[in-house]
Image (cartoon, rainbow, N blue to C red):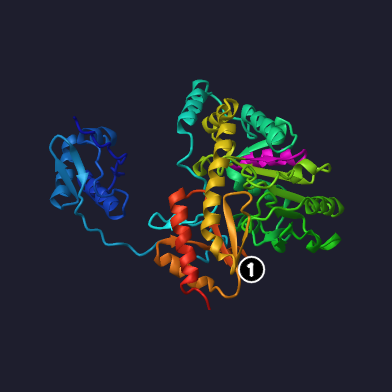
């Protein structure tokens, strides 16, 4: 088979015809400097001598002589029939860093995002991770192929998203979540985090207060902090956010962020009483609620509770959803449900941020939903995740004398709270030595944690791995992680 010919680098030296240096020497110097400064890297293929001569309007012999000089100096290598390349053996002394200092006046202080890459060398109880091995690739390819048949190549999508997908989402939410909205109320985003960015940018000015679950989802908290918000941690108990702890009147926060369906990371569900109390508080204090309906699709033992947005009669709730946990993380498609006039502001900001979300992906999800594949997938995954949860619960059952479990009735993770006899740090290190990565709940707190335990994400693990890792975790507790 014929090997592929390497593409030429688009590089043409600058020459000055009025210079006292000859054209040949100028070309040699320009190529040499480009190699030394890193613009031309080892292995790059230069344009042919004929092309260089035509582009620079010089005699071809001038180019040939210049390249021969650079080959003699071992900056370049010539391969008959293949071209001229930057030498792979060239040794370039690194220059002192030219990067600006961290205190440059135009560099805004910014904390690194609370995101950790997967550890492929470990078996990881990774939170927010669905089972991608069970994803229906055949049906997804059909939906993708169908979407590409009628793909518009001559225009952009509306900033709010493709109407077909917005209509499919509105229909699904009405049927599955009891949330009645029109397609016009739906704004398509690049994941839930962009939705939170948009709402925050439209409502929060620097210095204003945002109430946040404690413990809570760190990446969402960092979004609020990025926009200059002051974070007010509000404790979470067995019934969800403690609404009675929210300040009233002038001291009340502008916005409250909650994950009521399966609180992240404790896994509790906000009770119906608390939901109504939170809505009353928002109306009383002229505040807005962001409802991140995280993990709402996966319920096992408990009956579904209506989302806050479905109970809201005063337009106080902005509903945020995502396909990343239901389908696969790399999809990066989410949505926001908001009423006017906030919705118009979100559309304007979406346009300014990235104009619109990828059209082929939007249309593929629309086809995936309209063909019934989405509902079939959710139904199948509920059964699979329920089985995974049961295996984990059964394996860890002997820990009940020293631990209690939260959030097993829904979602893709559980919180295990240990009593004072278990040393969490030692337990984590013991598991790590066995090749298992687990997460301390302390990292989800803004202030000092008042709970001691682990957050175990089991959605992305296979059944045998859950059983093995669960047994290792149980053994680690029993064999010496006590004080």
330 left or right of 196 in image:
left
For the point 63% across and 34% down, the residue is 159
Magenta segment's dominant SS is helix
For the point 49% across and 31% down, the residue is 140
Residue 294 seen anywhere in this rendered image of the structure: yes
Residue where numbered disc 1 is placed:
451
Q: Residue 97: x and y, percent?
A: 38, 63
For the point 14% across and 40% down, the residue is 79
The residue carrying pointer 1 sits among few (fewer than 14), some (14 to 19) or many (20 or more) residues within 10 Å by Cα, namely some
Front-most of 231 and 463?
Answer: 463
245 left or right of 428 in image:
right
Magenta stretch contains residue 336: yes
For the point 64% across and 42% down, the residue is 321
Helix, strand or loop under label 1: loop
Q: Is residue 117 above or below residue 316?
A: below
Q: Quadrant of residue 340?
A: top right
Q: Which residues are magenta?
A: 335-353
């Amino acid at each position: 088979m014929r090997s592929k010919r390497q593409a030429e680098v688009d590089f043409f030296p600058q020459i000055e015809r009025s210079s006292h240096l000859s054209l040949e020497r100028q070309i040699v110097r320009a190529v040499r400097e480009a190699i030394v400064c890193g613009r031309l890297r080892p292995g790059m293929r230069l344009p042919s001598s004929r092309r260089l001569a035509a582009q620079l309007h010089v005699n071809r012999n001038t180019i040939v002589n210049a390249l021969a000089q650079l080959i003699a100096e071992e900056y370049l290598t010539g391969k008959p029939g293949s071209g001229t390349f930057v030498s792979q053996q060239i040794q370039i002394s690194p220059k002192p860093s030219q990067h600006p200092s961290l205190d440059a006046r135009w560099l805004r202080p910014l904390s690194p995002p609370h995101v950790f890459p997967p550890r492929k060398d470990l078996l990881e109880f990774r939170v927010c991770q669905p089972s991608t091995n069970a994803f229906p690739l055949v049906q997804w390819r059909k939906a993708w192929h169908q979407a590409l048949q009628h793909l518009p190549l001559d225009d952009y999508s509306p900033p709010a998203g493709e109407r077909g997908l917005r209509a499919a989402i509105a229909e699904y939410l009405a049927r599955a979540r009891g949330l009645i909205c029109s397609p016009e109320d739906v704004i398509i985003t690049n994941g839930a985090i962009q939705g939170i960015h948009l709402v925050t940018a439209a409502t929060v000015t620097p210095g204003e207060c945002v109430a946040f679950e404690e413990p809570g989802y760190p990446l969402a908290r960092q979004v609020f902090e990025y926009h200059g918000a002051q974070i007010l941690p509000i404790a979470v108990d067995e019934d969800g956010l403690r609404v009675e702890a929210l300040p009233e009147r002038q001291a009340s926060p502008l916005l409250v962020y909650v994950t009521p369906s399966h609180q992240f990371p404790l896994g509790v569900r906000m009770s119906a009483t608390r939901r109504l109390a939170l809505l009353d508080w928002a109306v009383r204090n002229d505040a807005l609620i962001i409802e991140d309906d995280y993990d709402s699709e996966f319920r096992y033992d408990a009956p579904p509770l209506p989302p806050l947005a479905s109970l809201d009669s005063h337009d106080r709730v902005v509903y945020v959803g995502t396909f990343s946990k239901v389908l696969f993380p790399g999809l990066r498609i989410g949505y926001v449900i908001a009423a006017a006039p906030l919705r118009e502001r979100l559309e304007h900001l979406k346009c300014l941020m990235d104009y619109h979300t990828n059209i082929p992906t939007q249309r593929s999800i629309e086809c995936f939903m309209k063909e019934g594949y989405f509902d079939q997938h959710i139904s199948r995954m509920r059964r699979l995740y329920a089985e995974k949860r049961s295996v984990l619960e059964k394996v860890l059952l002997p820990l009940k004398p020293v631990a209690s479990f939260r959030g097993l009735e829904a979602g893709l993770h559980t919180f295990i709270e240990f009593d004072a006899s278990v040393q969490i740090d030692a337990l984590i290190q013991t598991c790590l030595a066995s090749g298992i990565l687990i997460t301390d709940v302390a990292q989800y707190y803004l202030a000092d944690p008042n709970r001691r335990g682990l957050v175990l994400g089991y959605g992305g693990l296979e059944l045998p791995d859950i059983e093995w890792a669960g047994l290792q975790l149980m053994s680690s507790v029993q064999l010496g992680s006590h004080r």
